[in-house]
Amino acid sequence: MDKLFSRMLSAKKLKVYREKLLGGFARIAMPTLKSETQIQQVESVEKAYAMAKYAYSSASLYKTKYDHAVVKLGNYASPSDFLNIPILTKNELREGGLEGISNSQFSGAAHLLKTSGSSGSPVRIYRDDERMWEMAAYNMEIYYRWCEGKPYSNVLYFIDPTENTIDFAIAENLRTTVMEERLYSTFLPVEQQIQIIFEIEPEFISSYPTTMRNIASWMVTHGKSQPSVKMIHLTSESLDPSTRNLITTVFTNAQLIDSYTSTEVGLVGMPCLTHGGYHVPSASLLVEILDEQNQSTEETGKIVVTDLQNLSTPVVRYDGLADYGSWATEPCTCGLYSPRIKSIEGRIIDSIQTRDGNAQSPYTLTNAMGRVEGIIAYQIIQEEVDRFKVRVVVKDEFKTENSQLGEHVQRLLSGALKSQVHCELIIEEEILPATGARKVPLVISMVTRAAQ
Ligand SMILES: [Zn+2]
């Protein structure tokens, strides 16, 4: 069946890749003592400031931006020096173009990467080859922790084979440790993916929430389950509670683990097994959580990242991940002491606009939908402030109860939004991604998109 790579890596290339992976391991730092973390935190702000100076001197977009904001980048004295640096938005990154944001003098190996463009035209950046291998090393390190040092031998990956995506770059690096015949495309028809799962009976699957949701939804419809799977690793998109529930309904023995990753800066958070949330790889990334005035907050705020290592395209105080999160304050005893983000909100799904003009987390709606019996898959579209269209795939026995289901959903959404809304329910056979896209957004707001 259509494997992601039709040929194996040559022995020569495999040797080179193994050396690069070892190089990645040499660069990662996972503090295991509280004192180490504190030192690392202090150092990371200073490193981020150095990166801002590097960006200013090497990429025209940053020079123009910082000159315009009259920011003087002198010697680093205290964290407030860094906190005066303006935030970089996704639009600036997009419009600055690859030339504007990249270091034209950079001579090392780098990968050209594009974001998926699910919310507008894609952003293009370069990512240092060394940074990609570092991410591979982090991924292996956390995988060994999850398996308590006994990695599963029977593994399966469904990966996005689109050129210039970070997922495909990761797949290439995975060939160092995973056999090619276990790497498949996420674009295979769902029936084929399920056939592969039932043939291989893997213990470990790694893929994306959308892909696993499609697979699980097909299995629910056809009354199937697969207990062989012990662990499912999800990445690239956030895992909402209803998707988590659906996946564990059919993979009854699986532990679900999700990494927080992005095209722009790679790994943002490693899943914490004991306390939940995501540990920041703070040796290579500075994460800030800021309020609307761009001040640090202990509440839920936007996630702003500075890559401390990537030299081909510097990414400094970037808020274009469009994710919201909050810091976990209680100490973590999982063995990782790096800062921990409690939860992530707002990926691949839009915020909802309320009548008073505020943005509301779409998770209030997805949580409400998670309580409706009989729904296998859904998509909520906010067409106007108080008009919603809800596409659903339902179990057979619910197909005849169309009108009651519609009223039930309308009541739940009105309750979640604390305001009466009109809701049109459409029963579908399946909900597919747009042509060329992998993701099916759970919540789309035409109102929010029109305002952007
Ligand atoms: Zn932890």
Image: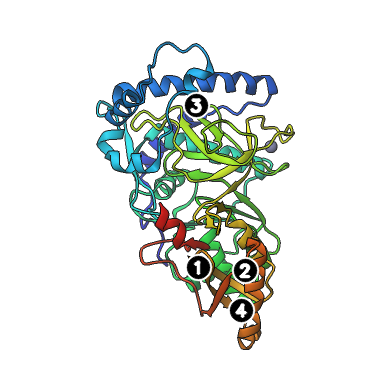
Quadrant hosting ligand 1 = top right
- Is the residue under label 4 in contact with that under label 3 (CB below 8 Å)? no
Q: Going 41% across and 23% down the picture, which residue do you hit?
A: 51
The image's mark for residue 420 is 2
Residue 56 is situated, as x and y percent measured from the top left of the image, at 33, 23
Q: Is tag 4's residue or tag 2's residue first in the polypeptide sequence?
A: 4
Q: Where is mark 3, residue-wise?
A: 27
Q: Where is mark 4, residue-wise?
A: 406
Crowding at dot 1, Cα within 10 Å, few <14 / some 14-19 / many 20+, comes out as many
Q: Going 73% across and 42% down the picture, which residue do you hit?
A: 274
Q: Nearer the viewer, residue 186 or 275?
A: 275
Q: Is tag 1's residue or tag 4's residue first in the polypeptide sequence?
A: 1
Residue 435 is situated, as x and y percent measured from the top left of the image, at 36, 67
Q: Amino acid at mark 4?
A: Gly
Q: Going 70% across and 64% down the picture, which residue do you hit?
A: 252
Q: SS for tag 1?
A: helix
Q: Where is mark 1, residue-wise?
A: 193
Q: Ligand 1 near label 1 (Cβ, under 8 Å)?
A: no
Up-down: is 425 above or below 281? below
Q: Is tag 3's residue or tag 4's residue first in the polypeptide sequence?
A: 3
The image's mark for residue 360 is none
Coloring applied to the structure: rainbow
